[in-house]
Image: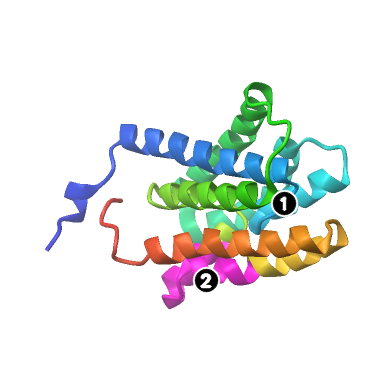
Amino acid sequence: MFDASATAHSVTEDVLGILTGTFAASLGLYLLQTSGAVTGGTAGIALLVDYATSWPFWLIFALVNLPFAVLAIWKKGWDFTLRTAVSIALVSGWSVVHHALLDIAWMQPVYGTLAGNLLAGIGLLILFRHRASLGGVNIIALVVQERTGFRAGWTQLIVDLAIILVSLLVLPWPAVLLSAGGAVLLNVVLALNHRPGRYIGH
């Protein structure tokens, strides 16, 4: 039998984990943006608004996640909420860094969409394991998993596909179809790797 206290993450591990998770997730979103694709969750909503307006992604992403702060405090507590707020801010910050230091003139859409979703999924998985998220659907999915046992990845997939369908209003259908495949990949990563009781670090 494992002693949970013996496997708890230290402060240093949490800081490095959140930095790593937000970097991976933000790089994935940058690849999606460069490919002209979307994904699910608040990140997908932010990308859609970014395509339809002249607003910068980092600002849209932060604003879209604000309403979910109340839900996070109510259902997950202040510790999770603060970690999530920091993670959202870091993803916004990393996106500025990527645009400044990683100038991609062209991205093959299939590669960019699949690689972007894979990186975003890995980043989210790291954040979940350090008691954080990127807000929005992540919070809802984690609450559903804790209350019902229904895996977070499957809940997120259902909502994500609905968001991607809405993107038909903004993007051509081939890009939407490819985005849907990428969202499935992202959520399979979460569903297969983020199960209650599987990971003993806290």
Horizontally, is 19 left or right of 160 in the view?
Answer: left
**Disc number for residue 105:** none
**Disc number for residue 37:** 1
Q: Where is residue 55 in the image (x, y as percent from the top left)?
A: 83, 37
Graded by Cα atoms within 10 Å as few (under 14), some (14 to 19) or many (20 or more), the crowding at tag 2 reads some
At x 41% / y 75%, what residue is drawn? 149
Graded by Cα atoms within 10 Å as few (under 14), some (14 to 19) or many (20 or more), the crowding at tag 1 reads many
At x 52% / y 46%, what residue is drawn? 119
Q: In this view, does 94 lie above or below 115?
A: above
The image quarter containing residue 4 is bottom left
Horizontally, is 4 left or right of 145 in the view?
Answer: left
For the image, the number of numbered tags is: 2
Q: Tell me the mark number nearer the camera, choosing from 2 and 1.
A: 1
The single residue placed furthest to the left in the displayed view is 1
Q: Foreground residue, 56 or 65?
A: 56
Q: Is residue 120 magenta?
A: no
Q: Which amino acid does label 1 sit on?
A: Ala
Is residue 152 visible in the rendered structure shown here?
yes
Q: Which amino acid does label 2 sit on?
A: Trp
Secondary structure mostly taken by the magenta-highlighted segment of the chain:
helix
Task: Identify the magenta region.
Answer: 140-159
Q: Foreground residue, 153 or 13?
A: 153
Query: Element type at marker 1?
Result: loop
| Residue highlighted by disc 2 | 154
Query: Element type at marker 2?
Result: helix
Q: Is residue 147 above or below residue 39?
A: below
